[in-house]
Image (cartoon, helix red, strand yellow):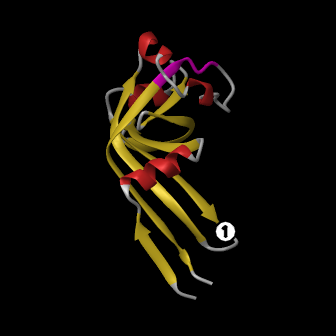
Amino acid sequence: MAEHSRELSTEECLERLRSQSVGRIVFCADGAPQIYPVNFAVDSGSIVFRTSAYGLLAAGVHQSEVAFEVDELDLEHHHGWSVIAHGQGQMLDADETQDLTSLHMLEPWAAGSRTLHFRITPRQLTGRQFGRDR
């Protein structure tokens, strides 16, 4: 079996982001890296998610440099892809929230009130497809 790996173009990265609804956001808080799974949508090339107003995620992401990762793995066939976005987290105001075209896609899986909306506009977007040929 031959292994293969290739970098994804920016458009391929966006296509793969749009194909998923759960990703992981990475930020620093309390002196350590934090990783949280979040439901998200892609809106005009940026990543949008909801969270609670008083949690560590909201405090750690607002106006901070973050990374966002989403992937898809086929464990049976040993191939998949991964996309990573780097950018700054921005809390959206009520007007910006109303303008979201992807709002219907942002239903959180987690219990509780998730009233804050955040946007990550990628300044860097990279991806890789990898696996084994049969």
10 Å neighbourhood of mark 1: few (<14), some, or many (≥20)?
Answer: few
Q: Which residue is drawn at 54% across and 36% down?
A: 40
Q: How many labels does the image show?
A: 1
Quadrant position of the C terminus in the picture: bottom right
Q: Where is residue 71 in the image (x, y as percent from the top left)?
A: 54, 55
Q: Quadrant of residue 74?
A: bottom right
The answer to whether residue 28 is above or below residue 15 is: above
Magenta region: 113-117
> What residue appears at the point 34 percent right and 45 percent down from the top-left corner?
86
The extreme bottom residue here reads 1
Seen at 42% across and 29% down, the residue is: 119
Q: Quadrant of residue 102?
A: top right
Magenta run includes residue 3: no
Quadrant assignment, res 105: top right
Residue 125: x %, y % from top left = 36, 50
Q: What residue type is labelled 1?
A: Leu
Q: Which residue is drawn at 37% across and 53% down?
A: 10
Residue named by callout 1: 75
Front-most of residues 99 and 2: 99
For this view, does 123 lie left or right of residue 85?
Answer: left
Residue 115 located within the stretch drawn in magenta: yes
Q: Main secondary structure of the magenta part?
A: loop
